[in-house]
Image: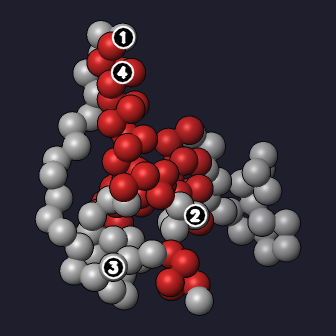
Amino acid sequence: MYHTGIDPLTGQQVVVAKGLRDRKTQSARMQFFEPENYFEMLEALEQAGRQGLIGGCDALIPSVPPPETMKARSAETRSTRSRGQEGPEASPSPQAECTWSHQAQMS
């Protein structure tokens, strides 16, 4: 299926993510609960026009990035800037409306 782009059972064409960005987005969608996928998931939801799934107690992802995500992103930004490249700017976000955790949703 990956090489041909055709479903062997139905014979219909299927969309296959072959580019790096497409694969990362697909992986982030499957593992939306992982903190390192927060920004990819945020961008994917905004592009799809599904802002209702961002923030709140019943949302897919929180409106405020998890602390682990922000620490990793700031470390990434520091290493990128030390090499002379401009990294993405992290804007301050408002406090979350509720305490959000993927462990709480799964239980």
Where residue 11 appears, as percent x and y from the top left, is 79, 68
Q: Compare marks 4 and 3 and give the one earlier in the sequence.
A: 4
Q: Which residue is mark 1?
A: 83
Q: Nearer the viewer, residue 29 or 66?
A: 66
Residue 9 vertical placement versus 24 (above, below): below
Residue 64 point in image, percent of width and height: 27, 64
Residue drawn at (28%, 75%) of the image: 55
Of 57 and 45, the residue lying toward us: 57
Give whichever of discs 2 and 3 has the lower sequence position. Answer: 2
Mark 2 or mark 4, whichever is nearer to me: 4
Q: Amino acid at mark 3?
A: Thr
Examine the image and state in which quarter residue 107 appears.
bottom right
For marks 2 and 4 on the same chain, the one whose residue lies earlier in the sequence? 2
**Circle 3 crowding by C-alpha within 10 Å: few under 14, some 14–19, many from 20:** few
Question: Which is more toward the observer, 44 or 60?
Answer: 60
Q: Residue furthest right?
A: 9
Left/right placement of residue 11 relative to residue 33 reads right
CA separation, marks 2 and 1? Answer: 30 Å
The residue wearing badge 3 is 99
Question: What residue appears at the point 53 percent right and 61 percent down from the top-left corner?
Answer: 34
Q: Dot 4 corresponds to which residue?
A: 80
| Disc number for residue 31 | 2
Question: Closer to the N terminus: mark 3 or mark 1?
Answer: 1
- In percent of the image, x 52 and y 68: which residue is there? 33
Q: Tell me the CA gap for discs 1 and 4.
A: 5 Å
Q: Are marks 1 and 4 in contact (CB under 8 Å)?
A: yes
Q: Amino acid at mark 2?
A: Gln
In the rendered view of the protein, which quadrant contains the N terminus? bottom right
